Every structure is written in C-alpha cells, then in structure tokens.
Image (spheres, coloured by chain):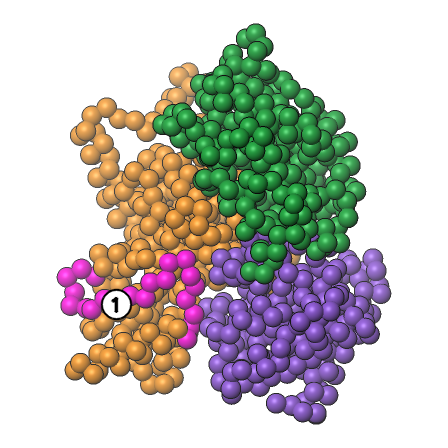
Amino acid sequence: MENKTSGSATSESKTGFTTRTVVTPNEAMPKVWRRETKPHRFCPGCGHPIILKALAQAVEELDIQGRTVFGCDIGCSLLAWDFFNLDSIQTHHGRTTPVIAGLKRARPDLIGVAYMGDGGGYAIGSQHLLNAAMRNDRVTVILCNNTVYAMTGGQMAPTTLPTQKTETTPYGRDPAMTGEPTLGPELMAAIGRKGAYAARGTVANYRQLVKFTKKALENQLADRGFSFLEVLSTCPTNWRTTPRQTWDFVEDDMTRVYKVGEFLKPEDEK
Amino acid sequence: MHTKIAVAGEGGQGVQSIGEILAEAANRSGLETTYMPNFGVEQRGGVSIAFVQISDRPIGSPKFKRADVLVVLSPRSVERTRGYVTPGTTVIYDSSSIEAPKIDDMTIGIQSWETLAPEGFADMAGNRPGKGIKGEEVRRDSNVRTVGIPAARIAKEELQPRVFNILILGAILAITKVVTVEAAREAMEHMFREKFAQRPELRDDNFAALERGLSLVETEQAGAGR
Amino acid sequence: MARIVDDDQRMFMTGNEVLAWAALAAGAEIMYGYPITPQNEIMHYWTRLAPRFERGFLQTEDELSAGFTTLGGVMAGKRAFSATSGPGDILMQEPICMAEMMRIPAVWIIQQRGAPSTATVIYGQQETRLACFGGNGEGHRVVYSTSSHQELFDYLIKAFNTAWSYRFPTILLGDGYQGKMREAVTLYNPEDHGVKLVPTEPFVGRPGVPGVDRAPAHYRNTFNIEEEIYEIVHAREEEFEALTPQIVEFESGYLDEAEMILIGHGIVSRAIKEAVKLLQNKGVKVGYFRPVTLRPFPVEELRKAVEKVPAVMVFESALGQLLSMVKEAVGGLPVKIEAFLRPGVGICTDEAAEQVQEYLRKSSMVH
Ligand SMILES: Cc1ncc(C[n+]2csc(CCOP(=O)(O)OP(=O)(O)O)c2C)c(N)n1
Ligand code: SF4
Ligand SMILES: [Mg+2]
C-alpha cells in the first residue's frame, strides 16, 4: 500500500489538520517505531500515537528494546499490533493484563508492557487490573483514557465525563444512573502494594509523559512492583471535535475530573 | 427486473451515501431493495463498497458476485472490484485526473463500521490534481460498456467538491433507469431534512449536482459512447 | 403496553434498528448490554427510544455482567434481554448455561461475526454451534435463525413469547449482514396482528413474607450427587422433546422430484432459495430446506424432505457447523451429503446455483 511506505508523510499534511497532532518525519521517528508500518493507522488528531511515541522513547532511553514485549488490547490500541520493532501480542478485549502477567511469570527477564483503552482496562478487564495490582505483578500497564469506547463507535466508557454525550448516553451521562467516572490511578494507589507505581499523564504534556513512562518501566526493571500509568488522550473522531475543541477538552474538561500526577511511588510507605 | 449495483471508492468520497440514497429512492418507488455497506477485512486496501440491489421481486443474498452496474471512483477501487465485472456490466468511472483521498485500510476498515471518517477527509475529496483513474484500465475487460465522466473536476470547478458523490448518483440514475430523479430527490429530502432545513443552499447544491450527473451521461451517450 | 406505531408502518431501515423497535413491540422492559460490533446499533437505538417508552437500559462492564444482569432482571419478573456477538457471545454462554439449568426465560440477540477469537466485526455463521450448544450443557434452549428484516421483527416478538411460555432461554440468531443491511420492514403492534404477549411473573420478591405468608423461593443450580443431575438432565430432555412439535419451525420448497435439496439457515437461506428458483427456471429439478429453529432442530421434517432425494448440499458461512447437525439428523438415510462451506464469508445466489449445477453435471457424467 502506497501510503504505508512513505515514511515522511505527516498526518497533518494529508488531512489539513494543523494543530498539535503527532509529527513523524523520518528523522524524528523513534528507532523503536517500525518504519514499514508508518504512517500509522490512527485517525488524525488521535492521542494513541503520542502515548506510543513516549513509550518508544522510554524504551530507547532505557535501552530495553531487546527484551521488551508489547501487548495490546482490542480497542483502537490494536491498531498498534505491528507499530514497533518489538515482539508484540494483540490479545482479547480486556485480557492484555493477564496475558502479559502470565508471560512475566514464565520469563521474568522480559519487560512486559500491557497497553489498553479505558474500556479494556476499567470495564471488561477491571478484575485483571485489580488482581494484578493486588499480586504486585511486575508488569507495566499503560491505559489510554479517551472517555469513550472509540473503536466500536463512541459508546459510554467508565471514564465518560458527567453530562458527556455518547452513543449509549445520547442525552448525556447521568451519574445517578451510571455512576461517576472511574479514577484509575487513585484506585491503584489505594490498593497498590509496597513498591508499586501509579500515575496519570496526559498527551498534552509530552515531556512529563515520557518521564512517567520511564518510571513505570524502571520500576519493573528494578523488580519493585506493579506499575500503572493512565494517560489522558484524544479521540476527535468520536468526540466529533475540531482540533481546537479537541485540545480544550483534554486540557480543560478532562483535567477538571482527572488530576495529572503521580499517586503512588515505589518508595512510598505502604 | 433485477439490477445489481456496486459503488466503490475511498472512504470519504461518499460512496455509502450514494448507496443509501439509491436504495431509499427505490424503496420509496415501491420496489424491493437491499443496501449493504462493506468495509473491513475483505477490503484490505481501504476501498469502501456499497452494494445495492433493486428488483420487482424479493431479493436473495444481499451481496453479489457480479454487478450489472459497477461504479469506480478511485484507482484502488478499480483493482479491488475487478471481480465484479462480467460481460454486460456497465462500468461508470470518474475520468478526471484528480487524486482521491486515501485512508489506511485498518483505520477505516475497522472503525467505519461505526464511525464516520473525520471531517477533514471528506472535505478534501477530489481537491488535488493526481493520477486519477486510467480509462484503459477500466476498459481492459472486453464486453464491458464503460462510461467515463469527469465528476471530480466538474464538482470542483462548477459546483462544490462535496457534492461529487451526488453527481455520480445522477449518472447512476441515468444509466440504470430503475429509479426516477424525483424519487431520488424525495429520498434526499427525507434523509437530509435536518441539514436542508438548517442550510437550504445544500439542497440547491445537491439537486444541481444530481441534474448535472444525469445530463453528463446523456451527453456522453450521445457522443462517443463505448 | 404502549403502542409503538399507530398502524402497520412500512419502514426502510437497518436490521439493528428493526430489532430495537421489535424489542419495544415485544414489550421488553429492560435491556442490559455491552458494546460490540455488529450489534452496537441495537443499543444505540434502544437508548434513544427507551426513555420515550419508559423502558430501562444498563450498560454493564462486560458481557458476563450483561448476561447475568439480564438473568436478574428476568428473575425480578421483567421481560429482559441482551444482545451480543463473537467474543461477547462466548462470555454470554456462562449466563445462558445458568438460564438453561434454572429455566430462566431470558432472551438474547446474537449478531454473528467472523470467528474464532476477535476475527472480523462483519459477518459469519460460525456461532451456530455456540448458540445451540454453547457452555457445559445439553442445548436446552430455543434458537431462531432469521433471514430478513421482517423476520427479525416477527421472531424477536416470538422469542419473548417462547421464552415466557416454555421457560427455556431463547436466542435470536442473526449476523452482521442482517444487522447492517437496509431493507424494507413492516412494523406493527403485536395485538393488531392477533399476537398476544405472554405475561411474565417474578421468581423472587412476590407479595408476602417468605416463610410466613408464602413459601420462600429457593433457586439453585448445584446438586450433590451424580444420580440427581442424571435425573434432572433426562427430565429436561424429555420436556424439551415433548415441546419440540410446538416450537420447531422450518421452510421448504420444490421438494417434489428434486434431484438435489439445498440446505441453509439464516441469511444464507435467501441465497439458496433464489438459487433454486433460478435453477428451476432453467428446468433443473432442485428444492430447498431451511431450518428456522436450530434448537430444536427440525429432524423429522428434514428426514421426510430428503427421504427420496439422491443428494443434498449444505451451504453455510462456517466450516461445517450446520453440516454436522444435518448429518446427525439424516443419519441412516441413503442420501449423499455435499457441502459448500465458506467460514466468515457470505454466499451469493449465483455462486450457490453454480455449485449445484457443477455437482449435477459431474454426477450425471458418472451415471
Ligand atoms: C469480549 C468482547 N466484548 C466486546 C468487544 C467489542 N469491543 C471492541 S473494542 C471495544 C471498546 C474499546 O474501547 P477502549 O477499550 O476504551 O479502547 P479505545 O478504542 O477507546 O482506545 C469493544 C467493546 C470485543 N471485541 N470483545
Ligand atoms: S477512533 Fe479515536 S481513538 Fe480510535 S484511532 Fe480514531 S481518534 Fe484514535
Ligand atoms: Mg477508550
């Protein structure tokens, strides 16, 4: 396919989107990214590739490309199944955490990354997330919070904001009926064991995101405990937002409900 | 009477809307009709196909192997739909050398079952010069009648780029002659009532494109006509 | 129940939209669900319609939960249902098993997609066996396999009535094509067509104090000894068999003098019916048989249909799931069984006709 091999194309130039979406000119592309599968398959303006770029940079800086295994879920995260020059496993919806946890038990020398959406992690896969945290499994879970089930067309997710309209909350999310948004890192911090790590980053602060990603990997490298990183992300396709509205939503609306920062550090007393 | 129509193009060219309007119009004319969108695995390559059948008796499978009328709107869709061509098929293609928007198959392949392509895609449909469809490629199959119309160019120069697909619809009406222009207009009034109410100029633009598509085929047929 | 349309109303819509309307017409009171393609729009339309008709909806955390909340809803005496597909269908089998064991009249809509695993989101008939025999049970459930939008509407109404009449879990088995396709359908109020909605009743929470005013309700699905479960399964089977003549449905045509009978279910049956008409017009003597209920399977009817026929050809978008049911049903009869198996891919009219002609041409050369 023609557009898969031209590595220097940017999503912006193809679509007329001009604001801060990920720029991937050949030179700037992390080594861990697989050139043959770029440009990637995410929609223009999507936050997923920014999270994946931060992951690539962290893997590169920690020099663990040779022993990192990348797991992705069903959800738009699956579009990353051949994204990296990393051995990768695309699993079932919600099941990435146990697949990677199982792998880690069998091969503790590998670095296991489980990448998923908020539906995959907080809804269908919530029991796995909880139990991996309780067992203090030495894996790194990275979860993309885009407030919707993106791949299936924008239904309510556990992270949908109150009053936000989605395909299954056509009149706006009513917390009285559907509960309040899930606060993942806060939850992980509450149940996490000594040595665990829990943080929330955002695609709107890339440098901080790389820092958090690195910490989440380093914690596994040091064999200290479970590492969890949620990332506030964008989905202009399902939000039906312009580039400006998209960024306003992440930077204002989402951060009002979701505080960015570190909630549990390995050195914290537990 | 049983007409099988396949419309193929890139996501964002409005292929599925053509299918939907055509089917809605046929249904309103009291005919049996099915419309099936098609994305996904079978379409590795990002080509979107709409399958429409119109008949005066009940319709069997909603998909078919060979089309009576095949409409191809991008170079990739010519290749992807070669299998639908059979002796007797009429192939309508866009003969203007304008680049069709191209979206990676997986993005659209999986999601557009649910999700529309972002606005940016649709807006650039037929905006930039490019290779376009080569007439000889389309005519490669013998026993096939081909009708080339410079739809993207006319839409861009004389109308609006975004009514490109409606112009194509007009051409399909002229070739198939199974539903009338009135029925198509009525279907559009019904389907786009909110949009038309908000922006009445959309109605004029779309109806003008429909007429233009019809007349294009008539001139083509009066002229060379293969 | 509120009327959903003033009068019979012809509409042109997608199958998933039809099902949302059908559930309303059937008096469904609450839907429990989890998003999955190709059934999402059932939920999308339901969440838009439900408040207008005072019906309920709960989006759960996954299909296990959607299935078990449905059971809770039914045991509260409500006409409750869920809808799913593919990997969600797998998870739904656990609650369906409990419904089988405890005779809970829950209704499921299953829109099949490609398999195994996540596969495609589009179409398939590879959940046929799962729908009929999924889980660790014996298949004590009713499965209707539909083929058109009108049937989606008619049979969803019927599914609720079957479930509540006989207390077997009931499945409406469709597929992604049926969900996503647009065609004409006539929506109606069941009472206008002489269809009465079977009344529901609660399993628990009836009036009175348990142990004082009435006996407490005690439901279980666990038993102590082998013989106990042996007895239960046998009794269940006998009851299911006794009800079969009342429940079983099939459709057939052109059986007389047929040289071959084409067999298919669901949307594939449209292709084979059309193929038979096409071939008949050419003077080729072929007929068709379509099981409408896959559970119970129309065994007697199929045996009767193929008794005097030299061969049958089974068409399905799976690798032999209907085929094995057909083989089991016609066991012992001297009929030759051919098959055209297309896992995850649709079957077109022309293609079906070509297969049959090719076979007949070859077999006439052998004679
Ligand atoms: C068992 C099962 N249930 C449902 C689905 C359908 N499904 C596919 S992706 C998805 C939601 C994805 O949402 P999320 O995890 O938030 O990821 P996003 O696409 O938003 O990145 C669902 C419900 C499935 N594949 N498997
Ligand atoms: S649908 Fe949303 S989350 Fe998925 S690729 Fe597109 S923008 Fe990203
Ligand atoms: Mg999400």
Q: Does residue A88 show up?
A: yes
Q: Residue furthest top?
A: A269
Find residue A184 and report its image quarter: top right
Figure colour of chain B: purple
Quarter holding the N terminus of chain C?
Answer: top right
Q: Read off the chain for label 1.
A: C
The residue closer to the viewer here, A92 or B52, is A92
Image point (42%, 16%), residue name: C212
Disc 1 marks which residue? C338
Q: Does the magenta portion include C347? A: yes
Color of chain C here? Answer: orange
Q: Where A65 falls versus B171 (above or below)? A: above
Q: Residue at x 81, y 65 (%)?
A: B202
**Cβ of mark 1 under 8 A from ligand 1:** no
Q: Residue placed at 30% from the left, 38% from the top?
A: C136
Q: Is residue A114 above or below residue B171?
A: above
Residue A145: horizontal and vertical position, in percent?
A: 63, 33
- Front residue of A42 and C358: A42
Q: Where does the magenta region start and end? A: C330-350
What type is the residue that disc 1 sits on? Glu
Q: Which residue sits at x=66%, y=72%?
A: B132
Q: Is residue B169 left or right of residue A126?
A: right
**Residue B25: percent from left, percent from top:** 65, 71
CA neighbours of label 1 inside 10 A, class few (<14), some (14 to 19), many (20+): some
Quadrant of the drawing holding the C terminus of chain C: bottom left
Q: Is residue B1 visible?
A: no
Q: C219 and C297: which one is in front?
A: C297
The number of numbered badges drawn on the structure is: 1
Residue B204 is situated, as x and y percent measured from the top left of the image, at 82, 70
Give the SS element for disc 1.
strand
How far from the left and from the top, in percent, is residue A62? 55, 28
Q: Colour of chain A?
A: green
